[in-house]
Structure formats: structure tokens, C-alpha cells
Image: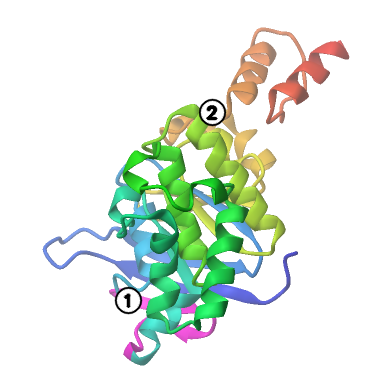
Amino acid sequence: MKNDSNIIEIKNLDFQYEDSSKKVLKNLNLTIKEGEFVCVLGHNGSGKSTLAKLINAQYLPTNGDILVGNMNTKDDEHLWDIREMCGMVFQNPDNQLVATIVEEDVAFGPENLGVERSELRKRVDDCLELVGMSEYKRHSPALLSGGQKQRIAIAGILAMNPKCLLMDEPTAMLDPSGRRDIIDTILKLKDLGKTIVHITHYMEECVNADRIIVIDEGEIVMDDKPREVFSKVEKMKQLGLDVPEATEISYLLNKSGIKVREDVLTVDELVESLMSL
């Protein structure tokens, strides 16, 4: 459900904090199309979370420009339009939950946007259904698991009907089950045509992305399909990053003389390659 129009354009972007002489991001040029699912990888301190906050206009570029839906993040009059278009999901869902009842929490954002009561009810129900949390709508968020809280946080952003979701390590605090729930939700949103920018340090979460962007020392060093990026195992390791477990096993097998397919991404693909020997 991608189309050819860019929802995000980043041109000659530099960014450094006021109290630092070092640039966090350097001469970044990047476009993201509507409906694309893009993963951003990089070791801690590489600048990937800063990039998300720049797209969301929480920070402004030191040099260069960021256009979100053709609106420049430097233009004050577009600030809330940009944040409405690009909703942000943070690492810790507790920082985004504001109400004592789940459905009230999901309603909080659109209610503040002035959404009518009948439309508000529909949005809350639809978004809870989408993230698989309808049965919890009258529960307290405080009683939910980390993964469930994160799904409620995502529902709250979706209820504001953004075109794009910026996800800043939303699975970092979750157990494997919670991480799977969030990735399943992301894939549902991709199928609905939402643009997703997913910042993560879990390589398996990127397998179904349209593109992976790797940032190192504030610069884009790789930008390609997952199969192309992860097949460069040695380069990823030089950058201090891992690859999916199945890709790593394939790499080690080939290194030891057992010739299997080098660009596998999943266990199923690895098994299929081994079976064909």
C-alpha cells in the first residue's frame, strides 16, 4: 500500500545539542514514502532516537530541513499539524498513559483535538480492536502487562488518526511475548497503509520491513532491503550490530564450509536451505 509520494524528506540535516561541540547527526539526506515500513538501526549514541525527535519537531535541525507532509518542522504554525500527522510511541508506555481507565486513555488525544463524541466512541473502539485490547477497555492500565500497556499507548496514538507512526524502541522494556505482540500490531498497521518508522535494537523486528537504515556516528552508512543489509554480516559486526539469529547461523555454516543460502532471514528459510543440501 505504498505510493510514490514522500511523507518525510530530510535534506542536508545536521544536529548538535547546544551544550555540545559534537554533531549528533551529520549531513543526513533521507526520504520515506507514504505507507513504507522503515527500521532504523544503530548502536547506542548513534543518533537514531534524536532523528525520531527531529521528525516529530521536538528538536529543530542545526542545519538543513525536515519536511513532514511538505511542512517544514522549523515553521511554528505547522508544529501541531506535524505532530498530528506523525504520532510518536516511546520506549516506556507509562510515560504516555494518562487516565485511570483504558478507554479514557485512548480517548484523551482525539478528545483534545476536538473530535465529536460519536466519532470519538468509534475511534476508541476501532483502535482497541486493532491492537487486540477491546476486552480490557474498562480495566485500569496500571494492572496490565508491559506489552499490553504499550498496545494501549499505540491505540491512543492511532485514535488521533496519524498517517505516520514514529516508534522509538517501543519493545525495549518488554519480554519476548510482549515484543511479538507489538511487532504483530506494527504489521497490521503496515497492511492498513500507515507509514512506520521503527527504531529498535532487535534485529528480528526488522525482517518484514521495506527498508533498513543503519546509522553510525550520526551518518547513514546503509540503506537497503533487510535481506541486503543483513547478508553483510561482517560489516554489521564492525558497526557493533547483530543480525537475525538465522542469518548468523547461516554465516557460521558457510564459514565452516557448509554451503547454505547466505541471505536467510528466518528459521524457516534456514531449515529449507539445509533440507536442500
Q: Is residue 135 magenta?
A: no
In the displayed structure image, the side of residue 25 where residue 39 appears, left or right: right
Task: Say which element carries label 2.
Answer: helix
Range drawn in magenta: 61-76
Q: In percent of the image, x 64 and y 20: which residue is there?
A: 251
What residue is shown with label 1?
63
- Residue situated furthest bottom in the rendering: 77
The amino acid at mark 2 is Glu
Q: Nearer the viewer, residue 119 or 19?
A: 119
Q: Nearer the viewer, residue 175 or 99?
A: 99
In the displayed structure image, the side of residue 218 where residue 106 appears, left or right: right
Q: Is residue 55 visible?
A: no
In the displayed structure image, the side of residue 216 where residue 190 appears, left or right: right
Write down the quadrant of residue 4 in the picture: bottom right
Mark identifier at residue 218? none
Are the residues at dot 2 and dot 1 in contact (C-beta closer than 8 Å)?
no
Q: Position of residue 127 (x, y in %)?
A: 57, 60
Question: Number of numbered discs present?
Answer: 2
What residue is shown with label 2?
234
Q: Nearer the viewer, residue 51 or 114?
A: 114
Write down the quadrant of residue 267 in the picture: top right
Q: Residues within 10 Å of mark 2 (few under 14, many from 20)?
A: some
